[in-house]
């Protein structure tokens, strides 16, 4: 299903027709391929020239999804020096810790009133801002249209055309609906949501909970423990969201629960894997290098904890994850501390 | 952790001290072992004499958890002919389709004001009653204390002392708290909840959703599809619960989301496995026999759908599961029908 034709059709009217995807990690690569299949003329922009050259030559990403061929219609370049003049949609898929820097560097080269779609799940490590807030601030003079895409959407499966359901959030409903028409495909379902706060917080916190479930897996604990962590992790997410003005219903949906479950139980999840490796004795500081992939939860955990503390909230799972990755707390002690917390009535 | 001592300690004061577990399936067997580890003098009651004789001789269940040894303190018998005079707690762990019949047959042999704990997750196939309602009706003259235990608690993991968090629900909070003290162990956490309606409905519906996720797995779909099914399945559960008077917060907790995730993603889940086998072409009518295990979702699905229709609710996942198991609908057509439903704003 969802075969990518080599000569794509035409993008649906009213939406973007030419897109630049900034960041050629696995999700950026899979999404560029998906956009091309939807008839959008797409350029995938890498950080490094060698990566762009390899992609141009082989139509495969040397670092991610190596067995996925990209259609001949996709072009390649580097986002440090390309021109953005011909695009009406900029898709951002760079790690959260580079996000603000990339936005600032692109700003002088962008036109007014362009459309933006953010794929990265995380928060600004410097000050806890949501990533769409970075775009709104850094590009304010350009009056950008901004949306984020979230939900359980492992790149490996999207690239193979497997059924996927996502959430597209924006404060501008007309913009969200135009993008929805463009992005929706036979196997790629898109729901629109106006709760940008909830969708972005959920995307950041779920990676922290995924680290915790990976640690539980790494200790050899089973599906009961994992289900309990996911449930209590969702409660932490809802608590933080309520304090920051999110709609609680967002957390019951695909961007909340859906992505949390997808990330915490998937063989594809790099955050779950990072937690598993840490529980088995790998250094939290080195694990991303060992995996050759970014695990956003490692960046998000201290930021989420700082937000919780600023609002006087208890987030015991997040607190334990930070204690492991920042202070070297023994993972076994975390499990004991979480299991032996004072019994109380169960509530969110 | 949670090693079972061969000479158990003493049960906590105020709670039951002698328990009969009716039904020696995997959960009944694992729970009998757990009760013994909590100092409760426990008898495990089988349906068949040969099974009781085998257990007495080998302290292992020939049909389930074969590698788990039961402590020498556990006794064995058959629930068709034993005396219940010496017990203060009756634990029910028989399949939902036998539940009413077993309750009616035990009634004349039970004392007044005994305590009951129901472990079965399902609804009365005859009339959609919750299983605790069956106990309250059939044993009304005995004024029983009734509670149910739910949450993500695969027998295989509880039997191995792996960390598990559960929900104990009763309309009698004092009874629930006495049982909580008895059942809580180092690796077995028990939260009390007064929403019997929500806890029991969740336990029935989650098995139906697990059949659906198993079918998705069986078609070769991935973690994105599974996460979407779990999310939309929780929405169906919440919708039914709201119509029947449950507390929506129950579904965000361990008995709702927790058990749903545990059942839909676990290698141990028999309902997920049944769905997978059906998607691969096995007959829904024969799959329980092939597995040698009950898959409660097969019994619950039509009962849940009838409840939904009686209340004018849409439950498209449940509807598709029933169409597969009752009318032979092709599983691939279900996926297409669920994915191509008219796009609408995402909400519960």
Image: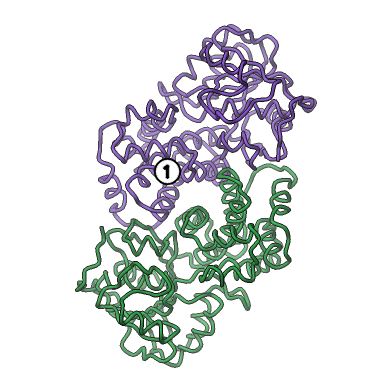
Chain colours: A green, B purple
Q: Is residue A156 above or below residue A80?
A: above
Label 1 crowding class (10 Å Cα cut-off): few <14, some 14-19, many 20+? many
Which residue: 68% across, 25% down? B71
In the shown orientation, is residue A164 left or right of residue A339? left
Q: Is residue B307 left or right of residue B104?
A: left
**For this rendering, which residue is in front, A261 or A3?**
A3
Indicate the position of residue B36 as horizontal and vertical percent values: 70, 25
Name the residue nearer the viewer: B32 or A304: B32
Q: Circle 1 sits in a helix, a strand or a loop, which is it?
A: helix
Residue A285 image offset from top left, x and y in percent: 64, 71
Image-based side of B162 in relation to B345, left or right: right
Question: Residue under mark 1: which chain is it in?
Answer: B
**Is B210 on the left or on the right of B90, as rendered?**
left
Image quadrant occupied by the N terminus of chain A:
bottom left
> How far across and down, in percent of the image, does residue B341 sit?
29, 52
Q: How many marks?
A: 1
Which residue matches tag 1?
B236
Residue shown at 62%/16% (left/top)? B56
The residue closer to the viewer here, A249 or B34, is B34
Q: Which of the 4 quarters of the picture holds residue A346?
A: top right
On the image, which quarter does residue B258 sit in?
top right
Up-down relation of residue A347 to residue A122 (above or below): above
Task: Please tell me which residue is depicted at 34% across the width and 90% down the height of the picture.
Answer: A85
State the image coordinates of residue B247 (x, y, percent, origin top left).
Answer: 55, 40
Residue visible at 34% across and 59% down in the picture: A189
């Amino acid at each position: 299903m969802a075969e990518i034709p080599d000569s794509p059709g035409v993008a649906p009217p009213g939406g973007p027709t030419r897109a630049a995807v900034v960041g050629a990690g696995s999700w950026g690569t899979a999404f560029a391929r998906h956009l091309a299949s939807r008839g959008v003329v797409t350029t995938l922009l890498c950080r490094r020239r060698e990566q762009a050259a390899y992609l141009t030559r082989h139509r495969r990403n040397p670092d991610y999804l190596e067995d996925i061929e990209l259609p001949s219609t996709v072009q390649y370049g580097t986002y440090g020096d390309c021109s953005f003049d011909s695009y009406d949609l900029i898709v951002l898929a760079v790690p959260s810790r580079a996000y603000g820097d990339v936005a600032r560097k692109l700003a002088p080269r962008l036109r007014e009133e362009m459309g933006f779609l953010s794929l990265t799940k995380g928060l600004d490590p410097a000050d806890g801002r949501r990533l769409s807030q970075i775009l709104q601030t850094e590009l304010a003079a350009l009056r950008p249209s901004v949306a984020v895409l979230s939900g359980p959407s492992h790149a490996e499966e999207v690239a193979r055309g497997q059924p996927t359901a996502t959430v597209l959030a924006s404060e501008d409903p007309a913009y969200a609906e135009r993008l929805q028409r463009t992005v929706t495909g036979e196997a790629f379902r898109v729901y629109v949501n106006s709760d940008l706060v909830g969708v972005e917080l959920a995307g950041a916190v779920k990676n922290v909970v995924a680290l915790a479930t990976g640690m539980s897996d790494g200790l050899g604990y089973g599906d009961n423990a994992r289900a309990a962590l996911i449930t209590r992790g969702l409660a932490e997410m809802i608590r933080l969201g309520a304090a920051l003005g999110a709609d609680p219903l967002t957390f019951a949906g695909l961007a909340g629960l859906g992505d949390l479950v997808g990330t915490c139980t998937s063989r594809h999840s790099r955050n779950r894997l990072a937690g598993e490796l840490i529980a088995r004795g790998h250094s939290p500081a080195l694990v991303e290098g060992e995996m050759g992939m970014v695990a956003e939860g490692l960046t998000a955990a201290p930021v989420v904890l700082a937000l919780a503390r600023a609002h006087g909230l208890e987030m015991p799972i997040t607190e334990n994850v930070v204690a492991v990755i920042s202070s070297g707390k023994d993972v076994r002690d975390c499990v004991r501390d979480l299991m032996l917390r004072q019994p109380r009535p169960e509530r969110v």
